Image: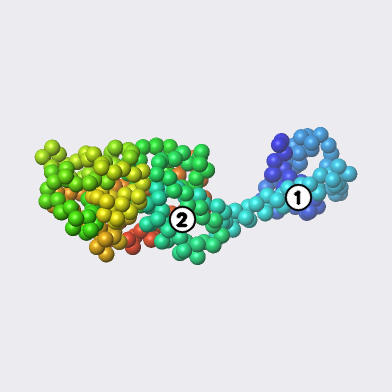
């Protein structure tokens, strides 16, 4: 489109005020500037919109027809700007959030009711995925990433850190005994991840170092599945505090080898693309999430946690 909004505004204001001078005063511009805008508009349209006489300005037939369209365009732009302003005051629209299923179940689900009450115009969608997804391909506004970030094309906001612990149920320990040393784990059923293998490196101090690469007896792709298996007495696993704090508090899971456990802080970030303006609905969700996490005991904010 060749015509600019400034030219349309100059044209309609001249018509409304009756003169170029009056229009210039209303628009806080110079009379020569308004006159040049009108001339450019007429040149682009290749028509005469206003007949200029020494006493007044008169609309031509083409000018009358174009005025209707110009007013409509300016009104639509003003309406769009008002809608954006309202969104800033009262965020609205669809918000797609992606995360691993344990984080959705144990962290996001409990805060959904408060978020929806606070921002009823936002249509929240929670998508679970155990793998890292491409945000654009999956039409995702925001993702929660647990662990070290590798994608530099993303903006990231730190949400804190969560500790890892080796855990088992009392029922399993009653049946198979409590391991007294890291070496004792070799005779137990160990529950681990299908991938990546880095998740099967447990933070345990032993003769060869501060990380123990285990060979799982039973594997699962989701931490929530491993949690359920551990609760069912299927074996020993290593999971993050954000999904096991309630289990440890009520005794459903018990920490093992605490004196051999190395303090590992698992960073948690909210991410979105750098070339995406932070929409108000994303900002509101991040603020609400941050406020809620500040009240959680499992969240750690200390040295070594971004």
The percent coordinates of residue 181 (x first, y second) are: 12, 48
Q: Residues within 10 Å of mark 1 (few under 14, many from 20)?
A: few
Residue 203 can be seen, yes or no = yes
Q: Secondary structure at mark 2?
A: helix
Left or right position of 58 against 14: right
Residue at the spot 63% in from the left edge and 52% down from the top edge: 81
The percent coordinates of residue 104 (x first, y second) are: 41, 53
Q: CA distance from mark 1 to mark 2?
A: 36 Å
What residue did someone put label 2 on? Answer: 285
Of badges 1 and 2, nearer the viewer stands: 2
Marks 1,2: beta carbons within 8 A: no
Q: Residues within 10 Å of mark 2 (few under 14, many from 20)?
A: many
The percent coordinates of residue 17 (x first, y second) are: 78, 54
Left or right position of 286 against 262: right
Q: Does label 1 or label 2 sit earlier along the sequence?
A: 1
Residue 305 can be seen, yes or no = no
Residue at the spot 73% in from the left edge and 48% down from the top edge: 73
The residue lying toward the viewer, choosing from 22 and 265, is 265
The residue lying toward the viewer, choosing from 52 and 249, is 249
Residue at the spot 33% in from the left edge and 63% down from the top edge: 295
Left or right position of 213 against 78: left
Q: Secondary structure at mark 1?
A: helix
The residue lying toward the viewer, choosing from 58 and 258, is 258
Which mark identifies residue 55? none
The percent coordinates of residue 180 (x first, y second) are: 11, 51
Q: Of all residues shown, which one is farthest toward the front?
A: 175
Q: Choose top left, top right, bottom left or bottom right for residue 175.
A: bottom left
Which mark identifies residue 72? 1
The quarter of the image holding the N terminus is top right
Residue at the spot 54% in from the left edge and 62% down from the top edge: 120
């Amino acid at each position: 489109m060749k015509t600019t909004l400034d030219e349309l505004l100059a044209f309609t204001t001249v018509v409304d005020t009756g003169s170029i001078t009056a229009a210039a005063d209303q628009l806080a511009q110079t009379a020569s500037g308004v006159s040049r805008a009108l001339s450019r508009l007429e040149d682009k349209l290749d028509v005469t919109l206003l007949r200029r006489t020494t006493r007044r300005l008169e609309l031509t037939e083409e000018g009358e027809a174009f005025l209707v369209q110009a007013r409509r365009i300016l009104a639509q732009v003003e309406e769009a700007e008002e809608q954006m302003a309202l969104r800033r005051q009262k965020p609205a629209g669809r918000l797609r959030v992606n995360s691993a299923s344990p984080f959705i179940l144990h962290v996001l689900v409990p805060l959904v009711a408060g978020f929806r009450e606070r921002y009823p115009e936002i249509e929240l969608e929670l998508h679970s995925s155990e793998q890292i997804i491409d945000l654009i391909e999956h039409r995702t506004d925001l993702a929660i990433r647990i662990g070290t970030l590798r994608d530099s094309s993303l903006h990231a906001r730190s949400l804190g850190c969560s500790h890892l612990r080796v855990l088992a149920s009392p029922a399993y320990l009653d049946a198979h005994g409590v391991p007294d040393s890291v070496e004792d784990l070799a005779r137990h059923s160990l529950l681990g991840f299908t991938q990546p293998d880095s998740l099967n490196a447990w933070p345990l101090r032993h003769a060869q170092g501060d990380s123990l690469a285990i060979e799982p007896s039973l594997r699962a792709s989701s931490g929530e599945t491993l949690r359920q298996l551990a609760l069912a007495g299927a074996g020993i696993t290593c999971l993050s505090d954000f999904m096991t704090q309630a289990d440890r508090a009520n005794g459903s899971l018990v920490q093992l080898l605490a004196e051999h456990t190395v303090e590992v802080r698992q960073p948690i970030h909210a991410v979105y693309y750098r070339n995406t303006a932070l929409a108000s609905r994303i900002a509101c969700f991040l603020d609400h999430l941050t406020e809620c996490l500040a009240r959680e005991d499992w969240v750690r904010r200390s040295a070594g946690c971004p």
